[in-house]
Amino acid sequence: MQEGTIIAVCASKGKGTAKEPMQKSVIKADWGIENDAHAGNWHRQISLLSYEKVEAFRSKGAPVKDGDFGENLLVQGIDFRNLPIGAICKVGDVVLEITQIGKECHSGCDIFQKMGTCIMPKEGVFARVLHGGTVQPAMTMQVFTKYRVFILCASDQGYAKKRVDESTGALVRLMEAHDYEVVGSSLLPDDRAMLSAKMAEVCDTYQADLLLTTGGTGLASRDVTPEATLDISERLVPGLSELMRMRCLTITDRASLSRGICATRRRTLIVNLPGSPRAAVENLEAVLSPLEHGMSMLTGRMKECASVFGAENTLENIT
């Protein structure tokens, strides 16, 4: 994960004009900044630019102000040019997905006329808004280029602090070893409503690409994790749970008692795992290969970094 600081938030009411800095702005999901001319139902809802690139341009004598390049967010500490398409940027509640690197330069723009060049074609990036919220200068932006994982443990005993949750730590180590980024975890009792509410929250606010649950997949009366998952799921992915049971049956015939399911909600894949640390790891290891490919399809992401501006450098032409 990379971190940067918002230097300026800018918008303009008309296209072809410089954007003006604002003290605070509302960013709307699948739209962009309220009252910004470039907001809309397309893949370039938000434009981002690195503050360091602007400062380097200014050092050459260019009298440019914040927003003059048409950027919505000017950010210090992040080199957007080297991010892969599909990278996730998070500012407070706002979640952005990088969709395009660079743009075609219009030689008639004021900066090009004055300086004979412009940095936006190579250094500017564009994003769509997955989740909205309010942004203002001095806020921290987090950028994720790896798949993000959230771990939810269901355990009455763990929630009551009568048992130590060891499965979460075991899964953290496994996922980090396979180049995933664990972005959060939670421990809840075996309560169907609480579990489903937490899963829905993680998915609906785009907190993670992969949501792993541990515990509550057996036959005990309080084992309700599969039911909680069904309550909020949009599509089932039965092949993954079938593969986990099939491969783990070679280890123990008790794998036949696991009722865990796999499903999706929005752009998040949910995988139910047993509560035992060893069983949780064994089950997840059984599906690591198809898991990554599945998330690639679900999120529309790719791993290759974008090169120069062109049709091939937009998310629309990848998915």
Image: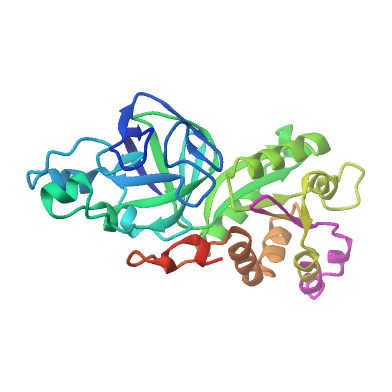
| Residue 191 in sight here | no
Segment tinted magenta in the rendering:
244-268
Where on the picture, by quarter, is residue 201?
top right
| Residue 168 in sight here | yes
Quick one: which residue is furthest to the left in this view? 61
Between residue 75 and residue 209, name the one nearer to us. 75
> Residue drawn at (42%, 57%), measured in percent from left and top?
100
> Residue drawn at (56%, 59%), measured in percent from left and top?
175
Instruction: Establish if 258 lies above or below 132.
Output: below
Tally of numbered discs: 0
How is colour applied across the structure in the image?
Answer: rainbow
Instruction: Locate residue 13, reporting x and y percent.
Output: 38, 32
Quick one: which residue is furthest to the bottom in this view? 250
Instruction: Establish if 209 lies above or below 131.
Output: below
> Residue drawn at (31%, 41%), measured in percent from left and top?
75
Instruction: Locate residue 232, reporting x and y percent.
Output: 78, 44
> Residue drawn at (22%, 51%), measured in percent from left and top?
108
- Residue 269 placement, left or right of 131: right
- Residue 205 placement, left or right of 225: left
Between residue 234 and residue 292, name the one nearer to us. 234
Residue 138 shown in magenta = no
Instruction: Locate residue 103, reporting x and y percent.
Output: 34, 57
Which of the image's four quarters has the C terminus? bottom right
Between residue 219 and residue 104, name the one nearer to us. 104
Instruction: Locate residue 49, reporting x and y percent.
Output: 31, 46
